C-alpha cells in the first residue's frame, strides 16, 4: 500500500517488494520495510530509512541523510554534506565531494 501526501512534499510508506521511487523536488521522506528498493533523488533535504536488504541509493544533491540497518547496501553521492550510518555488512560507499562523514 502506498500513501502519497502532497501538501508538504511527499511521505511514502511501502510494505511491498520491488519498489521504485523517483523524486525531483525537496523535503522527501521515504520509509520502506521491504526488499528490492531503488531510490533516486535530484533535490535537497532527503531523508531515507530502510530496514530491508538490496538497497540502492543515488543522490546528486546536498543535505543527504542515509540510515540503513540491513545488508547489501550501495550508496553513491556526488554532492556535499553527506552523513552515512550503517550497522550491517557488505557496505559499498563512493563519494566524489567534500564534507563526508562515514560511520559503519
Image (spheres, rainbow, N blue to C red):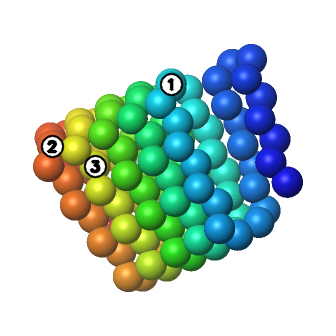
* Quarter of image, res 63: top left
Determine the secondary structure under disc 1.
loop
Give the labeled residue for mark 2. 97
* Quarter of image, res 98: top left
Furthest residue in direction top, as rendered: 7
Answer yes or no: do the residues labelled 1 and 2 have beta carbons within 8 Å? no
| Residue under the point 71% across and 64% down | 33
- Nearer to us of marks 1 and 2 is 1
Q: CA distance from mark 1 to mark 2?
A: 20 Å
Above/below status of 83 relative to 17: above
Give the labeled residue for mark 3. 77
Residue 59, position in %: x, y?
Answer: 36, 45
Going from the N terminus, do you reach mark 3 or mark 1 first?
A: 1
Residue 88, position in %: x, y?
Answer: 47, 77
Tell me the quadrant of the picture where the N terminus can be found.
Answer: bottom right
Q: Which mark is residue 26?
A: 1
Going from the N terminus, do you reach mark 2 or mark 3 first?
A: 3
Q: CA distance from mark 2 to mark 3?
A: 8 Å
| Residue under the point 49% across and 79% down | 71
Amino acid at each position: 500500500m502506498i500513501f502519497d501526501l502532497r501538501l508538504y512534499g511527499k511521505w511514502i510508506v511501502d510494505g511491498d517488494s520491488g519498489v521504485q521511487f523517483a523524486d525531483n523536488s525537496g523535503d522527501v521522506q521515504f520509509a520502506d520495510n521491504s526488499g528490492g528498493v531503488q531510490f533516486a533523488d535530484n533535490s535537497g533535504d532527503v531523508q531515507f530509512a530502510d530496514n530491508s536488504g538490496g538497497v540502492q541509493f543515488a543522490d546528486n544533491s546536498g543535505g543527504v541523510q542515509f540510515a540503513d540497518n540491513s545488508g547489501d547496501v550501495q550508496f553513491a553521492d556526488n554532492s556535499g554534506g553527506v552523513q552515512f550510518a550503517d550497522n550491517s555488512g557488505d557496505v559499498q560507499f563512493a563519494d566524489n565531494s567534500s564534507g563526508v562523514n562515514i560511520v559503519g
